[in-house]
């Protein structure tokens, strides 16, 4: 199948326009595959960068969660929750909780973007592969048709001109004895 992709399976000069079209289609597919490879080549690096950022955000959330737990323990143990120190601690806990939620939202947004990007590339690949498969199928059909025509021509050349003519007339529904009449040669049934 690789020869079909690159157009190498088409005979040079080809059997007319079809051979040239098949070869052109092969070149177009090759160019497409190169361009597509260039566009997806950066995905692993981008994916790695975004996953590293998500990991850093996870670490930040873990640190905040530990700080919140420690601060909540101090706040819970305090006897006088209305003194200035405890009010500031409570505000710090609220601020850290908000930051923790914002960081979690940022992680979700990063993952959604990453998923959308990968899904888009996969969808693009699926669409292009469908076009590629169709082009290959058409090229195979053209090549099979050309091979059948060449085989029929080869058989006709080997059979000689009389057999090829009889086969032609037989395919038109004429019996061999009627061919003489039809050709004006005065076969068995006519004069």
Image: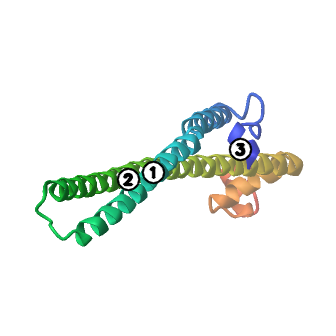
Res. 4 mark: 3
Residue for point 70% across, 53% down: 168
CB contact under 8 Å: marks 2 and 1: yes
Residue at (37% x, 53% y) in the render: 107
> Which element carries disc 1, helix, strand or loop?
helix
Separation (CA) of disc 2 from disc 1? 6 Å
Circle 3 SS class:
helix
The circle on residue 107 is: 2
In terms of depth relative to the viewer, which is nearer, 178 or 120?
120
Residue nearest the viewer, comparing 55 with 96: 96
Colour pattern of the rendering: rainbow
Q: Position of residue 44 (x, y in %)?
A: 58, 45
Query: What residue does disc 1 label?
Result: 54
Which one is earlier in the sequence, the residue at label 2 or at label 1? Answer: 1
What is the spatial separation of the Cα atoms under label 3 and label 1, in whole angstroms?
Answer: 44 Å
Where residue 173 sits, quadrant-wise, is bottom right
Say few, some or many: other residues with alpha carbon within 10 Å of mark 3 (under 14 / 14 to 19 / 20 or more): many
Vertical relation: 80 (above or below) 106 = below
Q: Residue at x 82, y 45 (%)?
A: 161
Sequence order check, earlier mark of 3 and 2 = 3
């Amino acid at each position: 199948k690789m020869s079909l992709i690159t157009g190498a399976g088409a005979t040079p000069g080809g059997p007319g326009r079809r051979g040239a079209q098949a070869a052109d289609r092969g070149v177009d597919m090759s160019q497409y595959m190169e361009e597509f490879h260039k566009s997806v080549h950066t995905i692993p690096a981008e994916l790695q960068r975004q996953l590293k950022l998500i990991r850093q955000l996870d670490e930040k959330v873990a640190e905040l969660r530990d700080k919140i737990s420690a601060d909540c323990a101090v706040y819970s143990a305090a006897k006088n929750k209305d003194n200035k120190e405890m009010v500031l601690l409570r505000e710090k806990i609220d601020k850290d909780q908000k930051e923790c939620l914002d960081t979690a939202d940022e992680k979700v947004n990063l993952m959604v973007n990453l998923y959308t990007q990968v899904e888009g590339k996969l969808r693009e690949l699926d669409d292009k592969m469908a076009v590629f498969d169709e082009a290959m199928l058409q090229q195979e059909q053209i090549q099979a048709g050309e091979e059948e025509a060449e085989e029929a021509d080869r058989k006709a050349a080997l059979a000689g001109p009389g057999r090829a003519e009889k086969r032609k007339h037989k395919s038109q529904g004429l019996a061999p004895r009627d061919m003489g009449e039809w050709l004006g040669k005065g076969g068995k049934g006519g004069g």
